[in-house]
Image (spheres, rainbow, N blue to C red):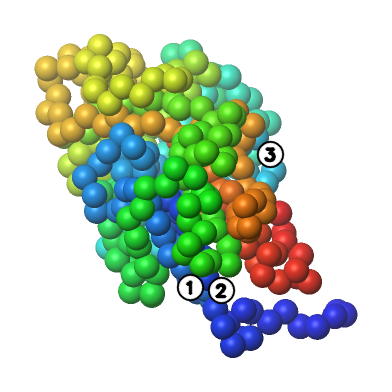
Amino acid sequence: MSGPPYMPWFNQGKMAQITIVGAGIVGMATASMLSHHHKVTVVARNLPGDKPSIEWASPWAGVSFIAGGCSSPAEAKMQLDAFAELWRWSDVYPESSIKKIPIEDFHDDKTEEDIWWKDYMPEFRFLPPESLPKGAKLGTAYKSLILNPDIFLPWLRQRLEGTGVQFKRMTLTSLSEARSLGHDVLINATGFGSLTLNDVRDQSVELIRGQTMLVKSNYDKLFMRDTGDTYTYVIPRLDGTAVLGGTRHKGSVDPNPDLDLCQDIVNRVNKNLPSHFSNNLQDYQIVRHNVGIRPSRVNGIRVEREVKDGQKIVHAYGVAGGGYIFSFGIARAARDLVEGYLFPHHPAKL
């Protein structure tokens, strides 16, 4: 090995100042990664512990780790990195609400060759054809993860604050407004905010409305079925409740639950799991309706560097409904780009 040894910033007598814009799961995971060696401040309009709002997606998520939906090998690596970290946390931090759970995942539009995660998920197996719901072409089972964002986000904020991460409530109309914070690097983890920030305005960002129901249920394993057009799921919280979904509606930002969609969801859940769930909406004890806007991006996740208006920026957004699935993976990729700025002789990995 040639060249000088890689010396972390803190070993050189100072800590880099990092500002993360956005306190959703991507921003929080990135803060967790970077706070080991740098001074981190998270700024956002909405912060963990706030009452859930349509203005950000993370509090509304059902949150189960269902692999797939990647547009590149880099995105697949992010998923695997996130899964490894969350799996470890499920053992080390049971108070975080992360739990291991079996999943059955069915597809109408995939073959075994499409299932790239078969070599990585614990206890993975293909299900026999006779066990598949009517119309499904492929079924898989493996060990997965769930968490409750109502518990996890405030818990992670408290944990980060305990390590020195600062949280500031700020409403920005552009990233340039954050320059006064005096950081060395700014991370843009604003999700669909990147569509409206004046100095980003990424026209590839799509708003995709999702609606789910949190209901009383003792069902105890994950169920997912993706037909290519619709997807139906049951995400148990293992606390006597489960999240039923799901929907995809591009361009809608209506925060109000649609009762016709509720009926459609229970119809689909009943069709796939008739012995466990009714198709009569009146049979359900509904704890809460969840309506959130997923920050999707037509061109896939954006994790890249940009110098603009005197700021060194790392963009980290575009995860659609996969914020938790990519979380610590996108955070690790963002960390590598940050260190590429701070240590130009130590090349960034992405």
| Amino acid type indicated by mark 2 | Ala
Sequence-wise, the earlier of marks 2 and 1 is 2
Q: In what element is the residue under mark 1? A: strand
Say few, some or many: other residues with alpha carbon within 10 Å of mark 1 (under 14 / 14 to 19 / 20 or more): many
Residue drawn where x is 30% and y is 53% of the image: 48
* Residue on which disc 3 sits: 72
**Distance of mark 3 from mark 1, alpha carbons?**
32 Å
Q: Is 181 drawn above or below residue 291 in the view shown?
A: below
Residue 91, position as x, y percentages in the image: 38, 64
Where is the C terminus found, in terms of image quarters? bottom right
Where is the N terminus found, in terms of image quarters? bottom right
* Residue on which disc 1 sits: 39
Front of the two marks 3 and 1 = 1
- CB under 8 Å between discs 2 and 1: yes
- CB under 8 Å between discs 2 and 3: no
Front of the two marks 2 and 3 = 2
Sequence-wise, the earlier of marks 3 and 1 is 1
Residue drawn where x is 40% and y is 42% of the image: 64
Q: In what element is the residue under mark 3? A: loop
Sequence-wise, the earlier of marks 2 and 3 is 2
Residue 16 circle label: 2
